[in-house]
Image: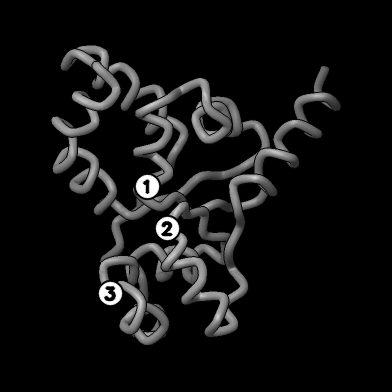
Amino acid sequence: MTKIIIDTNIVFSALLNTNSRIGQILINGNRYYDFYSPEYIRFEIFEHKEKIKTIAKLTDNEFLEIYELIIRNITILNHTLIPIEIYKKAEVLCKTIDIDDTVFVAVAEFTKGELWTGDLKLLKGLIEKGYKRLIKTEQLYQNFIVNEKIRK
């Protein structure tokens, strides 16, 4: 199975609309993909919990229910397990784009997976630097649809 590293903005999108393409891939895509993310993702999600609840008009319980539905298919990695040389490579790639994304690129390198992000600045910056471990929502969704049709 393809390893997909989930950036926080992908989870935000799914929390805001579970019926979206992103939401459906995260909720049902574990049959075709292995999802990973650094433990930092939990901090980021809960840091923005109130804003997400407001935008999506969710109660505390609804937020937690949707959060659990989405996060249950993502293997959360302790990023301290990533070797320092991999982390340094990721830092070099991200320092002129957004240093906060270093941990996501490091997880992609460590797992030899593909980074799934909706952050256009990060995508553009990494592509300009020749980084290849990237996958876009449309590509994932097309693969997901094909697999769902084969499955039925």
Q: Earlier in the sequence, mark 2 or mark 1?
A: 1
Q: Name the element at disc 1.
A: helix
Q: Residue at x 28, y 48 (%)?
A: 41
**Residue 145, percent across and down?**
75, 31
Image quarter of residue 99: bottom left
Q: Earlier in the sequence, mark 3 or mark 1?
A: 1
Q: Residue at x 18, y 33 (%)?
A: 51
The residue beneath circle 3 is 99
In the drawing, does residue 50 fall left or right of residue 14? left
In the drawing, does residue 28 fall left or right of residue 68? right
Q: Earlier in the sequence, mark 2 or mark 3?
A: 3
Q: Name the element at disc 2.
A: loop
**Residue 23, percent across and down?**
49, 29
**Residue 94, percent across and down?**
37, 78
Asked if marks 2 and 1 touch (Cβ < 8 Å), the reply is yes
Q: Name the element at disc 3.
A: helix
**Residue 18, percent across and down?**
45, 23
Q: Residues within 10 Å of mark 3 (few under 14, many from 20)?
A: some
Q: Amino acid at mark 2?
A: Asp
